[in-house]
Structures are given as C-alpha cells and as structure tokens.
Image (cartoon, coloured by chain):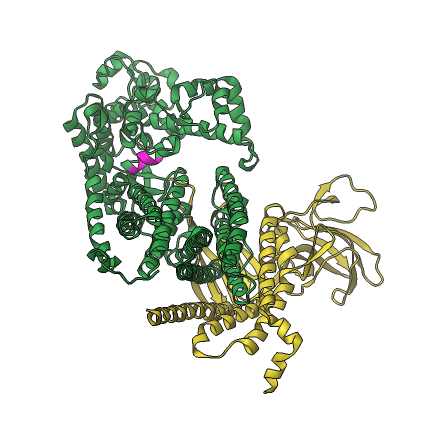
Amino acid sequence: MSRMGHGKPRALRRGLFGSFAWPAVACCALFVATATPGHGAEERGLSLKEFARITVLANGRKMPLDSYARINLLQLSGRQRHGKESALAWLARAIFDPESVLDDRFIRIDNPEIADAVGVERDDHRRYGFRELAQGYSQENNLVMVQRIAGIDDKERTPFEKEFFRTYNNMVSFSHMMSTYLFADPHRDFAASEETLATLGIETGGNPLSALQMLRHIDAIRSHFPADHQSGMDNLAGIERDVFQLVANLYSRRQASHGQNLPFEVIPYGNEEAADWMSPWQATLHIGGDPGIIDELNLLEAMRHAYRSGRQLEFDRAVRDFRKRTSLRAGPGFETRYPSLELLYNRANPFLYAKFWYALAFLVSLASLAFWERRCLFAATILIAVGLAFHTTGLLSRMLIMGRPPVTNLYATFLFVSWICVLLGVALMRFGRRSVGALLASLAGFALLMLSGKFATEGDTMGVLVAVLDSNFWLATHVVTITIGYAGCCAAGVVGHIYILQALFGKKDRARLRGTYQAMFGMLAFGLIFSAVGTILGGIWADQSWGRFWGWDPKENGALMIVLWCALLFHARLSGMVREIGLAAGTIIGIFMVVLAWFGINLLGVGLHSYGFTSGTAVGMLVFFVAETIFMAITVPLARRRMA
Amino acid sequence: MSRLESFAKLKLVRAITSLRVTVVCLACLMVIVFWGTIYQTDYGLYASQQRFFYSWYFLAGGFIPLPGARLVMWVFSISLLGATILKLKYRWSNIGILMTHVGVLSFFLAAFITFHSSQHSSVRLFEGGHANVSSDYNEWELSIWQEHSLDASTVQRDVVAVAGLKEGRSWRLSDPNCTVDVETYYDHCRADMGPRSADAPRNAAGITRLTKQKRHTSPEEDVPGGIFRILSPGGDPQRVLLYAAEQVPLTLEIGDETYFMALRRKRYELPFSLKLLDFERKVHSGTAIPKSFKSRVEVRHADATREVVIWMNHPLRYADFTFFQSSFTPDEQGSIFAVVENPGRWLPYIASSTTCLGLIVHFVVMLVQSRRRQARMA
C-alpha cells in the first residue's frame, strides 16, 4: 500500500507517532483516575482504604492485603469480585464476621458431579455456599472419599477426584481463614471459675477466657501460678488448680503446634536475614510474651470490634496504629516494594482496559476493509495507542512491584508476547503496511490478553520464583528473547492468515498482496532470529546451571522445533519448493510450533522445565489445531488456483 | 574454471549441497525431535536420548528403520559444509548468512566433541567430608582393593576395577593374581536374604538370592547386582554375590592375602580434593518453594587450599571440570554436585556468538536493503 497521501487529514500526515503521543497521555490520566483510592465505597458503609494497605506474607512474598484478598477470592471463586462486593470487603467479612459469609455462593466447582456427590443442588453459575458444601462434605462416605483420594498420586486421579479434592482443600483453607480470630475468641479450654477470674482481675461476662485475654493478664496469672506444680494437678485446689489448668492448656496447644496452618500472616518476626511472619494465632502462642506483640494483637482485636460496630474512625485508627507498630518494630526490611503501586495496579486493572481498546480497534480495523478506509484506520491507530498505553503501564507496574524482568511465569508470557505483537503491528503500520499492522496489533493484543486470563486463576500472578529461575540476568536475556521469538512467529502466523484471505477474497491488487507478503516474511525472519538467539541463550544458561549446553529436554526441544521450522520455511522458499501461499500456510503451522513449545510441552509433565497445567488447555489446543487445519485445507488450494 | 568450481559442478556434490537436502534434513530433525519428546513421557529422558538422538537409526514399530538424529546431523553438517564452501556467494551483503552458517557448523563440531569426550558424574558430600573422586551416574564397576578405609569418597590405592560388567565376561588380573568371571549380572535387581544352602555364593550381608527387576526410566535409580567367580591359581574357585546397595565390602582371601571387594559406581579421579564446609538450603518464608541452595567448599590442590561457594547458576570451574550445585541429601546435611568434564566446553559459546551475530547482521542488512528498495520505488 502506498504511503503517499493525497489530502489526508492533517493528523495522519504528521505520522503515526505524532498521533500516538496524546492518547498515551490521556490514557495515563485515565489510569490514575480509575485507580483513585476511595473509588467504590465499601459495603457496610465502612471504607477499607486503610485496611487494604496492611502488609501480609503469602505465597512467599509480601503484599498489601488488597492483593491477598484478590488472590484468595480468585482461588476460591475464579473471580476478583464477589458479586458487587470487592475482594477486600469479602475478606473483611470472612475474618471479622465469618457467620455472614457462610451462605454466600462463591466457592466455584466446575464439575457438577461434585454437587451431586455432596448432595447440593446444581448451580448454573457453578458457585456454592460454604455451609451447604460443608454439610455435604462432612457426610461419612464423602470423608472416606477424601481420604482415599489423598492417598492417590495426583497424576493418577480422575478429573472427578481432582475436582473433589481441590474443592475439599479450598473448603479447608477457607475455614482456616474464618478462624483468623481464634486468638481473640473465648475458648472452652480456657474456662475458669468466677472466683478465680475475680482474683485475677479479669472481666469476661461469664464467658471462658480467650488466649489474648490470658496474655493480657499474664502477670496476674504468673503470680498465682502454683510454686509447687511439679507434683501435678491432683495436689492443687481452688485458684491454683484453675491457673495451672489454664497455663497447661495454653502450653499444650503450643507444643502440639496447634493452628500452624492458620493464614493471615501479618505479624513480622525475626530479623531481615531470617524473616519470618506469623498469623495472629501463632504469634499468640509463640511470641505472645513480647509486650509489643500483645499491643499488636490488641489492635487486631480493636479492628474487629470497630468493624462489627461499624465505627469508621476507630477502625482506621486501629489499622493505622497496627501498621505503624509492626513496621517500627520489624524495621524497613519488612516493607513491600511499592505498596501504593500494587494497590493502584489492582484497582486499575490495566489489562482489562487494554483488552477492551484492542477489541474496539479490531472491529474498526475490520470495518476499514469495507468502507472509509483512511478514517477507520486513523481511528484504529488511536484505539491501539490507548490500548498499548494501558498495556505498557500494566507491564511496567508488574516489573516495578516484583523487581524483575517482565516474564516470570506462564501468565506473564501472555502479557509480554501480546505486547510485542502489538509493537510489531505498530512497526508494520509505521513501515506503510497500515491495514495489516492494525489488524495484527489489535487482534493479537486482544486474543492473547484474553487467553492470559485463563492462566491467572491459579493464584498469585506475581509469585516468587524457584531457586533455578531466580536470576534476573537470565530471565531478562533468555526468557525475554525466546518470548519475543514466540511473538514474532505468532505475528507471522496472523499475517499469514491475512495473506491467504487477501489472496482469496481481495481485489486483484498485486502490489498490496506483495506488501503483505513482505510483512509476513519480515515477521518470520524476526521470529526466527529471536527464537534462535533465545534458544541459544537458553543453552548457555543450561550450561551455566546444569553443566550441559543441550540435553534434549522437552522445553529445549520445543524451542528447537520453532527454530527448525522457521529455517525450513526459508530454505524451502529459497529453493522454490514452496511459493508465497505455501509460505503463508507455513507461518500458520509455525503458530502450532509456538503453541507446542509455549505451553503444549507442559502437558507432558516431564522434564526440568514443566510447571503445572490444566487439562482444559489440552482440549483448547486440539480444537485450535483442528480448526486451523480445516481452514488451511479449504483456503490454500482455492487461493492457489486464484493466484495462478 | 578453477578446480574448486569444477568440483562443485559434479553431480554428486551438487546433489549433496542442494537446498533440498537441507530442507529434508530439517524436516527429519523435526520429526525426530517431536517423536523423541513425546517418547519421554513414557520412557524417560535417558531412553529417548539413546533411541532417537544418540543413534544412527531407530526402528519404528519394531521393523521400519528410520534415521536417528546422529545420522541426520552428519548428513546435514556435510551438506552444510559443502554449501558454505562451494555455493554461498562471498560478498559483503551475504556476510550475515555466512556467519550464521559457520556458526551452525561449529555447533555440530561442538556437539561432536561433547558427545565423544565429555564425562558426566557426581559427587555426594556430607558436611566435613571430602572427596577426590566423582562417580558415574549409570556405569558400575567391580573393584578389588587391599587397604580398607571407611571413607568411601576418596581414592584408595591398590585398587583394581573392572567396568562394563555383563554376563559371560571374564577378566584376567595380575594383582591380585586371579581370573574374574561374571556368572550372573542384572542391571537392576532385588536382593533377598534367606537360608543359606551349601553351594550359595558368599556375601557380606547375608544375601542369598538376586531377582531381576524392570529397569527404571532413569537408569541412575537402578541397583545392579551379580554373582562372580574368582579363580586364583592353585586355589579353589570362589563364588561371590555382590549387590550395589551393600554398605560393607566383602572380605576375600586370594592366595595368601586378604582383599576387599564391592560393586560400586564407576569412579573418576579428580585433579584435586573437595571438602564440604557447609550446606545451606533456603525456602521462601512461609512456603516450601526453594529459594536457594548453597555449598561452601574447600578446594585442596597439593597443599594449597581455597574456599569456594557453589550455588545455583554459579558453578565452580577448574581446568576442564565444572562443579554444579545439583541436589542435596534428604536430611539437608549433605550436598550433591554434578561434575562435568568437557574439553570442548568453550565451543558452544563460540558457535553461539557467531550464529547470533550472523542472524542479527543479516536481519539488519535485509532491513536496509528493503528500505532502499522502497525508497527507489517511491
């Protein structure tokens, strides 16, 4: 397509990058606007703005409570919101007022057979309440089933067993979450006679004591602890007997590491070198003697009290005091890297907006094929620019929060590959292939970001890395290069589709077809170079960490297949074994290779690189392969006949 | 016409250096790589390497011979070499292509040298322990020695070791003066104790019977065992049973002397001795996700010592040897190192940089050319 404009709008003639500047600025403003704290007043009339900033340790990393809530809700229900309620509001109810969440339907079960097995009615939205499930799971036959599945190796489990067990584990971890305030609840193990309580100076209103109350009055309890306690309970009576019983019960829980799995690790302990975080219950049992810790536990209790009685000021004061005290006591090493940025990232959801703008851009680019070509392409350019601005902001935020290169896990590869595809599309637009570039950028950006969502439900998308991956240098070189290679091959495949369709349905415009062909050729060369360099860098990393450059490991083989396929295409084209249409079909097969190397290999579950997988992906892949094969089988022969 | 040109015109040479051969080789490699990857799911990496990648050919469905990666790579490298010398046009605009092809050729050279001369083994050390040998992953040897030391990690003097154990093989040794015959040998077997019959072979742990087992997909997990016949001149033949998992060596009289015998992993002598000072394993707090494995070791060469820290992605390099932090013992008191001896270990690096540079140069050349063409057309 010629770039010479006759009477184009002025903005068009200024060049694409001129027009890229203002939407980017506007978009950043929008990003900040949507993310302004206080957006969306929380239910119960209580603002959780301060509460969101409490630092908690989960999955091996420190994060603001807002992220923690989202990750937990995502794991349980596959969503980041519970109806109209934010994840944080849901979490607050779960820990401060567990009774109120018992009947909410948020536990996701994909396999309806589970509902039948536990005796609850099937739900079209695939979400169930904790209480009904708990009743079902506590039936004897189901408990036996759980035990039986626990004894089977995960690989050997049937899909039903997997889902049954996964749901059970989710229930257990949620019940742990609801027990966060175990430390402040009266417990029958800590019951004492009224006389004893009066002597100790404790007012409980007839209830048993809580562990926290015992800590508060530890001096009084200590002073009444029987001096002659070696001979055991039988020789004691009255207050001494009560006090001995209380201390013994508290101590035995500590010995039995009771409640070790309770979540909500918000109390930092230890030093920066050997940082350790404890849940309130663990802190009560293990470091409760420390007056600073008792203060923090008191503040947690005050938080719950204020929450339940709906007093915003008190609640915020308790939260702020708690944050101040923990950070003062623990020191700077316990802070998260950019807590405000992470909150902003969570609220703004930049990739959702990017997806939206790309989708819009794709529709407009399609429209440009039918009418108002210039105007539509101009609009598409702006829409893509807005999407790209969101996309870039999201990627940069993740990098800053994690302090890592953009790609650290499977989810992040989708974000990055789509970003590169969009950039490649933009580059094509810059080099005069405007239509093809706009289609590539918008379609690849949208489709890959959509796919990324499928890989985010496994929990924290910014989780810690295992030891062998923990190298920013290699992540930044090998991983980034190879994913750029994936992007290049994907982009070539998308342009390949466009080429075939153009050859089949387009006007007989040789120059235009030639332009698309060159774009495809360029993308493929780009893909080959980055895949080859990335594979080689991978070999060097392997040589550095395992002592062999090449070991025929599945992931290595996957990358090699991409390189071999691209090299084969170029040599086949050079020798005349395939023509333009053949090369286009080849780039589509190239996408197969990328899919195999990218996440198909993980299906095998062997090798040094394999990292977790869901069987739904296998079906998706198969459908994709079959659909593409049918597409090629129909279009390629027809296009060849038309070209001839 | 120069001699080279007329050589290039020969029919056979033209056929071998043609692009079709390249395409066919690439296609064959793709099939082999794909098949070999899928094969790993059921049979493991080792079996897949042996069948598809290190072999000249393999049998599909048990009777159709197909080329293995080794054969394809030989054909490919000959074709590539020929094409690089005879067919590629030596001009500036082709420099990227030339470099890439030379780079790929050096990969083949690197693969050849690594395949034929590199040695992979491992060293397992407990804190405070030291070693001057490393042991093979898959090969076992029968060793006989006189001076028994309890430290199993160091080289013992006066050791005779025979490797390549196989049923029916026989060795004639001079010191001790005897013949060793392999009566039975299993690559992987189970040992049973039971009542001893009069003709049962001798064994230090009281094992009386070995039962052959199916081999593991990763052969390093196999525990071999065998029955051997030792015949010294003038003495009666002695039958001994050795099992690889035994802790104590067998004591044996040969001639007038006492010897010790054991079946153990084949050993390689290291040019220095290694002592583990400290092993440390860290996890991300609150999880079981490993954060780092780190070993502090002391390297002793002659009388000079130095301390080295080996951790993930940071191996110890010494002459042709490289030591990698590979694993640790379940009690976290011991560290396991992978040891690689590879005289051509720098070759892949040369090949890598040549190939990468070539690809990038060619891409830039292409880009510049295409821009120029566009400018001309406009």
Q: Residue A89: name its quadrant.
A: top left
Q: Is residue B4 magenta?
A: no
- Asked if residue A222 lies left or right of residue B119, the reply is left
The residue at the far left in this view is A313
x%, y% of residue A137? 46, 21
Q: Which of A286 and A611 lies nearest the eye of the viewer?
A: A611
The kind of secondary structure the magenta stretch mainly shows is: helix
Of A125 and B168, the residue lying toward us: A125
State the residue in front, A496 or A325: A496
Q: Which chain is green?
A: A
Across and down, in percent, residue A588 comes to: 49, 52
Q: The chain shown in yellow is which?
A: B
The quadrant in which the N terminus of chain A is found is: bottom left
Question: Can the viewer see residue B151?
Answer: no
Locate residue A303: give its quadrant. top left
Q: Nearer the viewer, residue A130 or A596?
A: A596
| Label total for image | 0
Q: From this view, report whether residue A98 is shown above or below residue A158.
A: above
Q: Position of residue A237 (x, y in %)?
A: 33, 14
Question: Which residue is outermost to the front?
Answer: A508
Lateral position of residue B241 relative to residue A248, left or right: right
| Horizontal arrangement in the rendering, residue A323 relative to residue B148 (left or right) | left
Q: Is residue A462 above or below residue B370?
A: above
Res. A295 visible in picture? yes
Percent from the top left, x then y, of residue A50? 20, 35
Point out the stretch of residues depicted in magenta.
A67-71
